[in-house]
């Protein structure tokens, strides 16, 4: 059945989230652009999408906070009605060896990266089940699959997303609400801007394609997982240029 599609992308003002929002808009979706701090960029994106005739709104919410996600849900519901596609992209990285990590670092990393996925799925998926259609794509990471030195908290949060994705898909796929995740490798965004040229070179020496990925290349994989006709479910799709 062809239906009018509407997506919420978290952390969509910049980086991978922005590329996902633009890709979905190009594919005919109406798009709710969630942001936390990047208001100017979010409003610019919405203006750009609206100038192309795409129905779009920007909604501020810290997705680690359940009450803020309740407000996000209410605003999306009031404006669009049913949101059939949820892309959980918002995330932060924390690079510290474990003995330098504080309980506050643990709370913040796990809350922003993993609790946020619980918050949005908990609030947005019941409508998908009622409608008998939904697509959820979570952005995990290669470090959630493999683990990385000095990235224990980040790796833990992303491994949690992979487990959450598989479990929730088992629960919801029978209702035609399909849940998958994408695990990017090294993607050229602000998240990696603080790495030195030497660190980048070392990382890319372990990538068979020998280059960083782009946010648009991650967005292509996400878009695939939002399609109506889909036989990929509960999967973790690597978008890492062939990490060795
Ligand atoms: P980025 O450029 O640093 O963007 C991070 C995004 O997350 C921003 O839009 C930010 O929103 C949003 N965000 C952070 N905390 C938030 C919160 N509490 N509530 C709502 N939004 C929040 O990073 P990126 O590279 O695009 O990363 C996007 C996702 O891909 C993350 O989950 C990241 O872990 C994952 N990933 C990235 C790479 C990579 O190499 N870049 C690799 C693997 C996985 P505001 O600016 O509005 O605050």
Image (tube, rainbow, N blue to C red):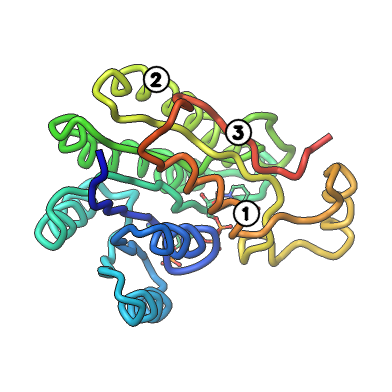
In the image, is the residue at mark 1 within 8 Å of ligand 1 by its beta carbon?
no
Query: Tag 3: Cα neighbours inside 10 Å, few (<14), some, or many (≥20)?
Result: many
- Kindly identify which residue carries mark 3: 144
CA separation in Å, label 1 and label 2: 26 Å
Left or right of 187, for residue 157 = left
Query: Tag 1: Cα neighbours inside 10 Å, few (<14), some, or many (≥20)?
Result: some
CA separation in Å, label 3 and label 2: 16 Å
- Kindly identify which residue carries mark 1: 217
- Residue at image location 28% in from the left, 43% down from the top: 120
- Kindly identify which residue carries mark 2: 167
- Residue at image location 45% in from the left, 26% down from the top: 231
Residue 45 image position (x, y, % from top left): 40, 75
Q: Callout 2: helix, strand or loop?
A: helix
Residue 110 visible in the shown view: no
Q: In front here: 149 or 12?
A: 12
In the image, is the residue at mark 2 within 8 Å of ligand 1 by its beta carbon?
no
Q: Earlier in the sequence, mark 3 or mark 1?
A: 3
């Amino acid at each position: 059945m062809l239906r009018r599609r509407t997506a919420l992308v978290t952390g969509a003002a910049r980086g991978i989230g922005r590329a996902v929002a633009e890709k979905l808009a190009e594919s005919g979706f109406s798009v709710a652009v969630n942001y936390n701090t990047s208001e100017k960029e979010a409003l610019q994106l919405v203006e750009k999408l609206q100038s192309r005739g795409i129905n779009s709104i920007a909604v501020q919410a810290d997705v680690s906070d359940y009450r803020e996600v309740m407000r996000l849900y209410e605003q999306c519901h009031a404006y669009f009605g049913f949101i059939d596609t949820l892309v959980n992209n918002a995330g932060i990285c924390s690079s510290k060896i474990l003995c330098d990590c504080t309980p506050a670092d643990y709370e913040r990393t796990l809350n922003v990266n993993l609790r946020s996925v619980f918050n949005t799925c908990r609030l947005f998926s019941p409508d998908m089940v009622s409608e008998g259609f939904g697509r959820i794509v979570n952005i995990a990471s290669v470090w959630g699959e493999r683990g990385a030195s000095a990235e224990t908290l980040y790796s833990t949060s992303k491994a949690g997303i992979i487990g959450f994705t598989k479990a929730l898909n088992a629960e919801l796929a029978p209702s035609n609400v399909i849940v998958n995740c994408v695990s990017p490798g090294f993607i050229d965004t602000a998240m990696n801007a603080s790495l030195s040229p030497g660190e980048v070179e070392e990382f890319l020496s372990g990538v068979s394609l020998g280059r960083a990925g782009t946010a648009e290349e991650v967005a292509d994989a996400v878009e695939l997982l939002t399609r109506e006709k889909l036989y990929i479910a509960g999967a973790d799709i690597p978008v890492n240029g062939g990490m060795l």
